[in-house]
């Protein structure tokens, strides 16, 4: 298992190398605001612990050439993104480059034991492929609220059997390394912040539209989790007064009217009413309809599918407009499976937010699709665990 940095200076140097890649000692000293002698002491200690490695000579800045250092290329981290209907597992190096990535369909309602058997089997396959001998840390995302300090899911609406399950403790024992657990949407926000569309933004909202709807809230570069870990649970904000019943027990929640599950149900209803030949033929072929079928039908120009997406985008935009007026973010990122609905969805959300929110809040507000797709969650998970491992012991 990796040694932890001994002090805040070492932790800062490790994070600079993680986020910026290999660098010269001279440039690191500038970025960390450390004197040459202090920097030399800290870097030499990090070389001794094996957390960093020498990486040749740097380009000349005049005078004696500085030596490059980088994070130890043998460090390996595991990122796990558990969604409602599938599991993503990836191995990265310490600079968060994805070296191997597996996806497997899995219903989260099968419970933690079945899901973690699948996760450990996938991690084993990545090891067997020669990508890692052991892991120096693992980050795990789950699709529900998490009591963050303990790494425990709390009454997650779509995860029966998970309430209070000690995810962090159990996986730490199984994997033999430190583990951190968070809500999957927070991790997707961290992924986009590290390597995606939110790289240069410190205050933004990441909205995941998948089986359910959630929002990662990033303030001053840090994820805001709230007192009990349930910040950003926007799927249960009321979008339609006295609307449809929701899994949470209330009526009219955004999630009950627009999410992967709601979209599939609306598509089925449209077929039953004879409103879409395109969706009817997909139902006949596949025996079922999903959000992906609605996306494909819309791409083929089906008016009913396009209408469903626009209506969902408008409802999402209504809720987001309130958040934008309240929080005044620098960026709104839309991600999750339903991003297959692409620009039709984005246009409807933008129209509603720009119409409803005050001009001061939306004057320079980009609302964009995420860049990382299915790797956002696993990259965010590894960012979370490296934040933990790269802090003083």
Image (cartoon, rainbow, N blue to C red):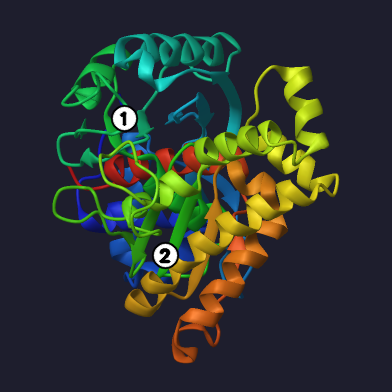
Q: Between residues 374 and 110, which one lies in front from this camera angle?
A: 110
**Picture disc at residue 2:** 1
Residue 19: x and y, percent?
Answer: 48, 55
Q: Residues within 10 Å of mark 1 (few under 14, many from 20)?
A: some
- Image quadrant holding the C terminus, namely top left
**Left or right: where 138 falls relative to 20:** left
**Left or right: where 163 falls relative to 91:** left
Res 347 → quadrant: bottom right
**Left or right: where 310 falls relative to 160:** right
Q: Residues within 10 Å of mark 2 (few under 14, many from 20)?
A: many
C-alpha span from label 1 to label 2: 44 Å
State whether residue 198 appears in this view: no
| Residue picked out by circle 2 | 319
Residue at (53% x, 61% y) in the render: 333
Q: Between residues 311 and 142, which one lies in front from this camera angle?
A: 311
Residue 36: x and y, percent?
Answer: 36, 68
Q: Secondary structure at mark 2?
A: helix
- Against 144, is 204 above or below? below
Residue at (63% x, 65% y) in the render: 348
Which comes before the other along the chain, label 1 or label 2?
1
Q: Between residues 358 and 304, which one lies in front from this camera angle?
A: 304
Residue 341: x and y, percent?
Answer: 68, 49
């Amino acid at each position: 298992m990796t040694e932890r940095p001994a002090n805040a200076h070492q932790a800062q140097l490790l994070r600079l190398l993680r986020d910026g890649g290999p660098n010269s000692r001279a440039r690191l000293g500038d970025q960390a605001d450390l004197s040459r002698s202090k920097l030399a002491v800290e870097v030499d200690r990090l070389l001794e612990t094996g957390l960093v490695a020498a990486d040749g000579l740097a380009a000349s800045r005049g005078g004696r050439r500085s030596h490059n250092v980088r994070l130890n290329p043998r460090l390996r981290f595991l990122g796990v993104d558990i969604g409602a209907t599938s599991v993503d597992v990836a191995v990265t190096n310490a600079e968060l480059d994805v070296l191997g990535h597996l996806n497997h369909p899995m219903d989260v309602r099968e419970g933690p034991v079945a899901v973690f058997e699948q996760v450990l089997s996938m991690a084993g396959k990545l090891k067997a492929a020669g990508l890692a001998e052991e892991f120096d840390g693992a980050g795990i995302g789950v699709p529900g609220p998490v009591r963050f300090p303990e790494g425990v899911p709390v009454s997650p609406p779509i995860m029966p059997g998970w309430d209070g399950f000690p995810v962090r403790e159990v996986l730490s024992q199984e994997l033999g390394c430190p583990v951190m657990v968070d809500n999957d949407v927070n991790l997707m926000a961290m992924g986009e912040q590290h390597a995606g569309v939110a790289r240069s933004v410190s205050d933004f909202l990441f909205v995941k539209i998948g089986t359910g709807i959630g929002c990662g809230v990033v303030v001053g570069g840090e994820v805001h989790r709230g007192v009990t870990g349930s910040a950003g649970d926007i799927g249960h904000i009321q979008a339609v007064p006295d609307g449809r019943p929701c899994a949470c027990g209330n009526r009219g929640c955004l999630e009950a009217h627009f999410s992967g599950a709601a979209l599939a149900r609306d598509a089925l209803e449209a077929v039953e009413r004879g409103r879409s030949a395109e969706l009817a033929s997909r139902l006949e072929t596949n025996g079922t309809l999903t959000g992906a079928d609605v996306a494909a039908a819309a791409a083929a120009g089906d008016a009913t599918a396009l209408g469903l997406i626009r209506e969902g985008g408008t409802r999402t935009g209504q809720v987001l407009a309130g958040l934008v007026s309240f929080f005044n973010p620098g960026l709104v990122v839309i991600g999750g499976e339903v991003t297959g609905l692409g620009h039709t969805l984005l246009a409807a959300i933008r129209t509603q937010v720009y119409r409803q929110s005050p001009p001061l809040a939306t004057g320079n507000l980009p609302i964009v699709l995420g860049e990382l797709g299915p790797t956002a969650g696993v990259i965010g998970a590894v960012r979370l665990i490296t934040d933990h491992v790269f802090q003083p012991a």
